[in-house]
Image (spheres, rainbow, N blue to C red):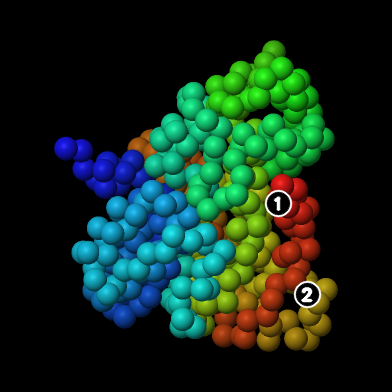
C-alpha cells in the first residue's frame, strides 16, 4: 500500500529552509505561524526545537493527512487550520507570536497533481484553484470579455502578447467551450510570436495570471501581511519568500514604507510622528536568494527572493498607503466576484 502522506511530503521542497530557520531562531517557548503549510517543511524544522509551538495554515484541503501526522507527533504543540492566510489573525486568540512565515506561490504538491490544472503537461480540467475559491480558470476564460482577459493576462502575468492571447481565447470559445488545460496551451502557443525565444515556457505568464486571479493572490498577500504584522510581538519577524515581481514589489514596499528608517513619510503620517507609527525597525532591503546547490536540487527555487522585517514596539496602525499603492491589482481581482 502507498503511504500517501509520505508521498506528498517527498514532493515538497521548502525553499531556503536553513535561511528561514536561522532568521526565525526557534528556541524554547516560542510560537511561530507557518502561513503556507504545504508539505510541512518549515513546520517540521521549527518543531524540532524543544517546546516550540507552530500554528500552520493552508487553503488546500488535501494536506490534511500531513497535518494530522504532525498533530499526532507533537500533541499540544502543532495546530493546523484549513484557512487562507489572510485570516492569520483569527488563529491566535489575541496572543502575540514570534515569527510568521509566508512561502508564496504554487507548491510542488499542487503542480505535480495534474488533476489540479496548474501544469502545462496536464490534459485535465482547467481548475487552478489552490482551495477555498469560488471560481475556476475554466469559468474565467469562458465568461470574461476579451478586454477583461487582456487586462488580467497583461497586468497579473506581465505578458506582452496579452492582446493576441485574449483575442484567440475568445475566438476559440465561440466554436466550443475551453475546458481542458491542453486546449488553452495550444491557443497560447499559437498566439505567441513565431520568433519567440525564451528559457521559460510560452504559457508561463498566462498561467500565472489566471492562477493569481482565480485565487485572488494579490488580495490574499496584502491582507495576509497586514494581519500578520498585527499579531507579531515587538521584535518578532515576518519572513516572506516571493516568486514573481508583483509579489516582491508588494513585500518590498510594505517593509520599506513602514520602517523606522523610511526617508519619506506617508501622506497619512506627519513627519514628526513617523518614528512613533512605523511598524518595523530599520529595514535594510536585504534580498536573500537560493544557493546554486539548492537551485540544482530544486530548479523552481531559482526565482525565489526572501525578505524579512522585524516588528517595532509601536502600536499597530493600518497601512493605508499599501492599499492605495496596489489598488490596481486589488480592484482587478474583484472583476469576477
Q: In this picture, is 336 found above or below 143?
A: below
x, y (%) of residue 189? 64, 19
The residue shown at (68%, 86%) is 276
Q: Residues within 10 Å of mark 2 (few under 14, many from 20)?
A: some
Q: Quadrant of the N terminus?
A: top left
Q: Nearer the viewer, residue 168 or 155?
A: 168
Q: In this picture, is 306 found above or below 196?
A: below
x, y (%) of residue 248? 62, 53
- SS type, badge 1: loop
Residue 279 found in image quarter? bottom right
Q: How crowded is mark 1: few (under 14 residues within 10 Å), some or many (20 or more)?
A: few
Q: In this picture, is 114 found above or below 6?
A: above
The label number, if any, that marks residue 337 in the structure image: 1
Q: Which residue lies furthest to the top in this view?
A: 194
Q: How far apart are marks 1 and 2 (CA)?
A: 35 Å
Left or right, 120 with reference to 166: left
The residue shown at (72%, 65%) is 322
The residue shown at (61%, 85%) is 314
In the rendered image, is residue 18 in sight?
no
The residue shown at (64%, 61%) is 222
Q: Residue furthest left?
A: 1
Left or right, 34 with reference to 205: left
x, y (%) of residue 249? 66, 54
Q: Name the residue under label 2.
A: 265
- SS type, badge 2: loop
In the rendered image, is residue 324 in sight?
yes
x, y (%) of residue 208? 60, 38
Task: Please give the count of numbered marks on the rendered protein.
Answer: 2
Left or right, 96 with reference to 142: left
Amino acid at each position: 500500500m502507498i503511504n500517501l502522506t509520505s508521498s506528498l511530503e517527498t514532493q515538497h521542497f521548502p525553499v531556503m529552509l536553513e535561511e528561514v530557520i536561522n532568521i526565525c531562531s526557534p528556541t524554547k517557548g516560542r510560537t511561530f505561524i507557518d502561513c503556507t503549510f504545504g508539505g510541512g517543511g518549515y513546520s517540521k524544522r521549527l518543531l524540532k526545537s524543544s517546546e516550540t509551538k507552530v500554528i500552520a495554515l493552508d487553503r488546500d484541503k488535501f494536506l490534511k493527512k500531513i497535518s494530522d501526522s504532525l498533530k499526532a507527533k507533537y500533541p499540544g504543540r502543532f495546530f493546523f487550520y484549513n484557512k487562507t492566510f489572510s485570516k492569520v489573525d483569527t488563529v491566535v486568540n489575541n496572543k502575540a507570536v514570534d515569527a510568521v512565515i509566508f512561502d508564496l506561490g504554487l507548491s510542488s504538491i499542487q503542480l505535480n497533481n495534474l488533476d489540479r490544472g496548474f501544469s502545462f503537461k496536464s490534459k485535465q480540467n482547467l481548475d487552478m484553484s489552490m482551495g477555498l475559491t469560488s471560481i475556476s480558470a475554466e469559468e474565467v476564460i469562458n465568461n470574461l470579455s476579451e478586454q477583461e482577459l487582456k487586462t488580467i493576462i497583461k497586468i497579473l502575468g506581465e505578458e506582452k502578447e496579452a492582446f493576441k492571447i485574449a483575442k484567440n481565447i475568445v475566438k476559440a470559445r465561440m466554436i466550443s467551450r475551453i475546458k481542458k488545460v491542453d486546449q488553452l496551451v495550444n491557443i497560447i502557443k499559437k498566439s505567441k510570436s513565431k520568433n519567440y525565444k525564451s528559457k521559460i515556457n510560452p504559457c508561463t505568464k498566462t498561467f500565472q495570471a489566471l492562477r493569481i486571479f482565480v485565487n485572488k493572490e494579490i488580495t490574499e498577500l496584502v491582507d495576509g501581511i497586514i494581519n500578520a504584522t498585527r499579531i507579531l510581538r515587538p521584535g518578532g519577524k515576518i519572513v516572506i519568500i516571493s516568486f514573481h515581481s508583483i509579489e516582491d514589489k508588494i513585500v518590498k514596499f510594505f517593509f520599506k514604507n513602514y520602517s523606522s528608517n523610511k526617508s519619506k513619510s506617508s501622506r497619512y503620517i506627519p513627519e514628526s510622528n513617523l518614528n512613533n507609527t512605523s511598524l518595523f525597525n530599520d529595514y535594510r532591503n536585504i534580498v536573500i536568494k537560493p544557493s546554486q546547490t539548492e537551485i540544482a536540487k530544486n530548479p523552481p527555487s531559482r526565482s525565489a527572493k526572501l525578505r524579512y522585517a522585524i516588528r517595532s514596539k509601536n502600536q499597530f496602525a493600518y497601512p493605508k498607503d499599501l492599499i492605495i499603492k496596489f489598488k490596481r491589482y486589488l480592484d482587478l481581482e474583484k472583476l469576477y466576484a
